[in-house]
Image (cartoon, helix red, strand yellow):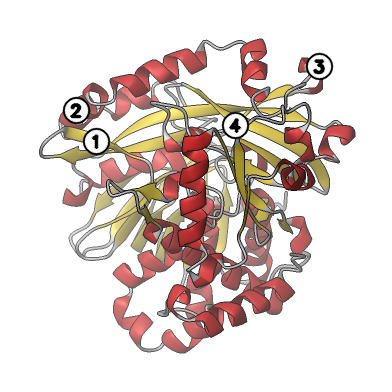
Amino acid sequence: MPDFLTKRTPKPKYDVVLIGGGIMSATLATLLHEFDSNLKIAIFERLGRFASESSAAWNNAGTGHSAFCELNYTLEKEDGSIDISKAENIAEQFEISKQFWSYLLEKNYIQEPKNFINSCPHMSLVFGKSDSEFLRKRHEKMITSNLFKGMKFSTDHDQLREWIPLIMSKRKDNEVLAATKMDLGTDVNFGTLTRKMGRFLADGSNVEIFLYHEAKDLDLLADGSWNIKIKDRLHNHKQDVHADFVFIGAGGYALPLLDSSDIPESAGYGGFPVSGEWLVTYNPELIAQHHAKVYTQATVDAPPMSVPHLDLRIIDGKKALLFGPFAGFSTKFLKEGSYLDLPESVNFKNIRSLFGAWWHNLPLTQYLVRQVAMTKAQRIQHLREFVKDANEEDWELKIAGQRVQIIKKDDKLGGKLEFGTEVVVNKNGTIASLLGASPGASTAVFAMMQVIEKCFPEKLENEWKEKLLEIIPSYGQKLSENNDLAEKVRNYTKEKLELEY
C-alpha cells in the first residue's frame, strides 16, 4: 500500500467528499473528475483497501445483470402476458456501464479488461410444464425487443445437453425442462474493476484517497455545506472536514450515516441485514462441463436476491463454479461491521417502518430461519436439484457479502421491504446516498448518473454535456427503441472489453 494513502492528512475543505471505497464511489469520483478535473475531491474508506465489502469478488455473484436470465425482472400479469419493461430498463443500465468501462479503456485509465470482465452465456432454466410454458411466453415476448434479440429457447434434451452438460447429466428422458440462452452475458469481477479505477484516481488524478479513514457523523452547516467527522483508524486521530457536496456510498453503513444527516428525505428508512453463503468448487472436471450462469425461479417466500443459480466464475484468471445463494443472518450492516449495527439503527423515525415490514413479511422471516439452520449436507441436497450426482467433497462453503435491504415507510403497511437500489437526495442536491442491493454494482454508472442529474443538473445540461456524450454515447436515448444504436453500442463495447460472444 502506498504510504501517501495512509500518511496523508485530509484538508479541512473539499468541493466533494465521497464516503466508501466501493464501485459506487469510484465510479462517481471518476465521472466528476472527467467532467471537471479542477474539482477538489476526497474519498474516505474505513478499511485498508478499495472494494473490501460488497464490491469484492466473492461478496457478490459477479453477474453482469442484463435481465437475460433473472426471471424476477419479467413478471407474468393477471391476463397471462409477460411484462418485460423492468428487464429492458436493467439491460439498458448495464449497457451504460459497459460504455463507461470502454471509455476508461480507450483513455488508458485502466487496462486488461479480461481481468474484470469475461463473456459468459446467461441462461434461465425451469422445471415442469407450468414454468416451461411461462419461459416460452417470456422468450416469445423478449425477442421482440432490440435488447434481447438472439435469445434462444429450447425444451429439447439433446440441445440442453450441449448447453449445460453438467446439469443434464443423469436426467430422466421424461423430465420436463425448458431453458433460454443469451450469449451476450458476462461474468464481472467488480472488486478488480473498482481497484483499477482506484489506482487511476490515486495516480492519474487530483482526487485524494484516504484509507483507514471512517466518516462518523454528518452535520448541515448554515451556509448549506456539510461538516463530516472523520476518524483516522490507524492513528486514532479525529478531525472535521467540510464539503459542498457529500455522497454516501458506504454499503450497509450508508443507512446510519444518512440518518445522522437529519435530512427530511431520510425519515422512515430502515434496514434489514442479510448475509449469504455460496457452495463453490474448483474441480476442473466439473468446471469443464459448465460454461454459463444458470438462474431458475425463486422458491416460495424467498426474496428475489435468493434466486438459485449455478454460475461459472472467473476470478484472477482462475475458474470456479458457484451455487447459491443461501441466506444467512447477522445484525452487522457490513462484514467488517459491528453486531450492534442493527439495534443501533432503530429510532423513533423508522420504528413504525421496521415493525410494518416485519409484520407483513413473516414468511420471509421463517424462510431466513430455515436457511440459517441448514447444514452443509442440506445445502448439497439443494445443489443436487441442479447437479444430480454432486459430491459433497467437491464443494466448499464460502461466505458472501453482507447486504442491507431497504425498509421504506408506507402509509398502508407502515413499512415495506424493497429489494432494489435507491438513490436518496436532499432537496438542495448537496447530499446523496445509495441504499439497497441488487442489481447494484452492475448498474453503478446509471445510479451515479442519477446522482449527477439530481445534484448537478445545470452543469450537466451545459459545460458537462459534451464530455458526457463522449463517455456514454447512448446517453438520453433508449436502445430498446433504436436498433441501429443498440447494435453500434454493443459492437463498440464488445471490441473495447474484448468480449467473445
Residue at left offset 61%, top offset 21%: 382
* Residue 76 higher or lower than 31, as above or below: above
**Tag 4, which secondary structure?**
loop
Measured in 3D between alpha carbons, the distance from the residue under mark 4 to the one under mark 1, in whole angstroms, is 25 Å
Residue 198 left/right relative to 165: left
Q: In which quarter of the image is the C terminus?
A: bottom right
Q: Distance between the residues labelled 2 and 1?
A: 7 Å
Q: What residue type is labelled 2?
A: Gly
Residue visible at 48% across and 64% down? 93
In the image shown, does 427 or 162 lie closer to the viewer?
A: 162
N-terminal-most mark, 2 or 1: 2
Which is nearer the N-term, disc 2 or disc 4? 2
As helix, strand or loop, the secondary structure at mark 1 comes to: strand
Q: Which SS class for mark 3?
A: helix
- Residue 416, numbered label: 1
**In this figure, which residue is indicated by the disc labeled 3?**
393
- Circles 2 and 1 in contact, beta carbons < 8 Å: yes
Q: Position of residue 359 (x, y in %)?
A: 22, 22
The residue wearing badge 2 is 356
Q: What residue type is labelled 4?
A: Ala
Q: How many residues crowd mark 1 within 10 Å: few (<14), some (14–19), many (20+)? A: many
Q: Which of marks 4 and 1 is nearer the N terminus?
A: 4
User: Do callouts 4 and 1 mark residues in contact (Cβ within 8 Å)?
Assistant: no
**Percent coordinates x, y for residue 279 in the rendering:** 68, 26
> N-terminal of the two: label 1 or label 3?
3
Residue 65 seen in the current view:
yes
Q: Earlier in the sequence, mark 3 or mark 4?
A: 3
- Check disc 1 and give the amino acid type: Lys
Return the residue at label 4. Answer: 400
Residue 461 quadrant: bottom left
Q: State whether residue 36 appears in this view.
A: no
Question: Which quadrant of the view contains residue 333?
Answer: top left
